[in-house]
Image (cartoon, rainbow, N blue to C red):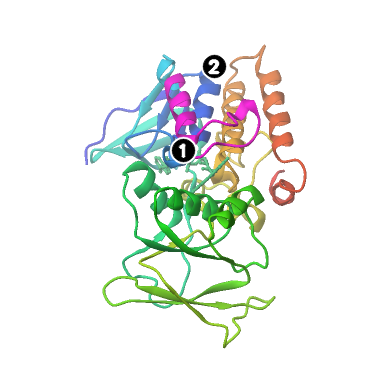
Amino acid sequence: MRQKNIKTTDVLIAGGGPAGLCAALAAASLGAKVVLIDENEVLGGQLVKQTHKFFGSEKQYAGTRGIHIKDILISEVEASSSIEVINDATVMGYYTEDGIVTYIKNDDFYKIKPGKVIFATGASERMLPFPKNDLPGIYGAGGVQTLMNVYGIAPGNNVLMIGAGNIGLIVSYQLIQAGVNVQAIVEAMPKIGGYLVHASKIRRAGVPIYTSHTIKEAYGQDAVEGAVIWEVDEKWQPIPGTEKDIKADNICLAVGLTPATELLWQAGCEMKYVPELSGHVPVRNMYLQTTLEDIYVAGDAAGVEEASSAMVEGRLAGYSAAKNLGLGKDRADALIQDALDELSSLREGEVGAKIRKGLEKIIV
Ligand SMILES: Cc1cc2nc3c(=O)[nH]c(=O)nc-3n(C[C@H](O)[C@H](O)[C@H](O)COP(=O)(O)OP(=O)(O)OC[C@H]3O[C@@H](n4cnc5c(N)ncnc54)[C@H](O)[C@@H]3O)c2cc1C
């Protein structure tokens, strides 16, 4: 690996999903020079495969499909002369001694010295331990979505979906739309975790949803041929004698996401385990500034939530980072307040209760 000259920028953003794109636009709108780095060829993060229409308010593009929200945000980023996009590149680390960020592109090693860094690295899919979970044909739901919606490939003919949260329900519906037979959805909780509107669509399509059930084991010779599921009691203990055999050539795991926080750990930010936010997340203030004053976090890396809140968090982090560099003095406070108000309204009511509880534990 060669080492290139060190360049500087006001704000560096790691991750070009909804949070990173909005952070870049926000910081640039206040006059910051921004470098946005993403490991993929195309920006957009999870949005690249989300063909369904979004909820939320007009400000978060409600009624627009995720893939179109991605196009809107990318065209705004491309139109900004203050934002440099570096794609196909992976951010490797942040070094507190000198405030340098390193990344790799095409086997070359680069250093950048930013004024502020925003980590918007998203989340990774969780795996589930069960016998034969390494058979070909067992995928994460995000992987299935990528195969279908990005590459146009059906993952199989008969799918068993594990998990009835929003992701499990949405991906099941997309599988049905693609002509794939969804044999059943299995959910360990006593009730469906996702929105009723998604569950109703699935039920209308005749797919059984087994709540208080889990997967016992997968079976198959060279690839998955089916699975045995069984009921669990209120303590999630399996109940012998309740086994059911489900034939499937694809098992899709939609059992949750974990914040992708490796870079925040490496940088030395104070981290805390908050189950309501789906794992270890950085301690921060209400402006998303971590315990290291030059590092901000936004989106799923700050706690797994939704693209709508990821976009607003991105804006909040972008405005806050720019403001702390002394930029946009006349407008920053009002924009920050707007973003805070928007986040509060997104997290209102019963739907936002879990996230509010999690945030109470992490915001200092
Ligand atoms: C199947 C599915 C359905 C969903 N449906 C909805 C919905 O209907 N409505 C809704 O609001 N939300 C939905 N969500 C959730 C939403 O997609 C996420 O909450 C949102 O994408 C989070 O945005 P983000 O920018 O934080 O992360 P991501 O979108 O994951 O983007 C993170 C980006 O950072 C990149 N990256 C990570 N590490 C590095 C690194 N070291 N260097 C460079 N780049 C890096 C990743 O490759 C990725 O491009 C869904 C999610 C899934 C998986």
Q: Is residue 99 visible?
A: no
The residue to which callout 1 is attached is 47
The residue under the point 34% across, 71% down is: 224
Circle 2 — which element? helix
Q: Which residues are magenta?
A: 52-76
Percent x, y of residue 68: 46, 29
Q: Quadrant of the N terminus?
A: top left
What residue is drawn where x is 48% and y is 60%? 126
Any part of residue 227 in sight:
yes
Q: Is residue 328 left or right of residue 7?
A: right
Mark 1 crowd level (few <14, some 14–19, many ≥20, 10 Å Cα):
some
Question: Mark 2 is on which residue type?
Answer: Ser
Mark 2 sits on what residue? 29
Give the x, y percent position of residue 164: 57, 59
Q: Are marks 1 and 2 in contact (CB under 8 Å)?
A: no
Q: Is mark 1 within 8 Å of ligand 1?
A: yes
